Image (cartoon, rainbow, N blue to C red):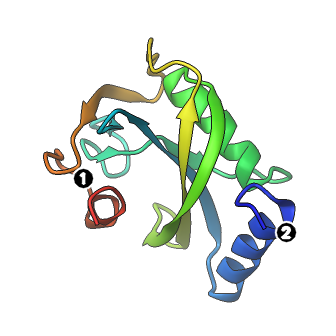
Amino acid sequence: MTVTSPEFLARLVDDARADGVTGFVAAAVVTDADRVLLVRRNPGDFMGGMWEVPSGKVEDGETVLEALHRETAEETGLTIEMVSGYIGHFDYSNSRGGITRQFNFEVTVEKTEPIILTEHDAYQWALPGELPEVSEAVRHLIAP
């Protein structure tokens, strides 16, 4: 079963619901050579100033995979060419007091430039051993 199969994706969501998770986020770990793309949250946002991988909410009626493609394009202007792997999830308390599960996928993009930010104030290509201020969950995701 591949990570892009409807069965695999449905199982991820079903397992999260069984764990009491109320929100879902799809995240793209975009790499270029040995570096990973990070975007910085706007200062006034929830967790403002924190660096993260491109990610966003799975909307009602949308699959995790559809959200992954849409959010990556919306936040960076990049188009996913291939989803090459599922690299796990982590849970966190969201701004509404519920629990959100972030599903993280390794992706290849058609082109790594230009990056067009719409929801963040900066981006960088970082080496896994030289990460800026990221959450512990993102640090373990990128540099286990």
Q: Residue at x 69, y 82 (%)?
A: 15
User: Which quadrant of the figure has residue 143?
Assistant: bottom left
Query: Toward the viewer: 143 or 100?
Result: 143
Kind of residue at disc 1: Val
Q: Image check: 1 left or right of 134?
A: right
Give, as a three-letter code, the residue at label 2: Glu
Of tags 1 and 2, which is closer to the observer? 2
> Measured from the top left, where is residue 102 in percent x and y?
53, 62
Residue 50 in the image: state x and y as whole percent.
26, 47
Q: Nearer the viewer, residue 79 or 46?
A: 79
Q: Residues within 10 Å of mark 2 (few under 14, many from 20)?
A: few
Compared to residue 61, the image places residue 75 above or below, namely above
105 sits to left or right of 91 = right
Label 1 sits on residue = 134
What residue sits 30% from the left and 66% below the top? 140
Q: Which residue is mark 2?
A: 7
Q: Write the residue at 72% across / 71% down.
A: 13
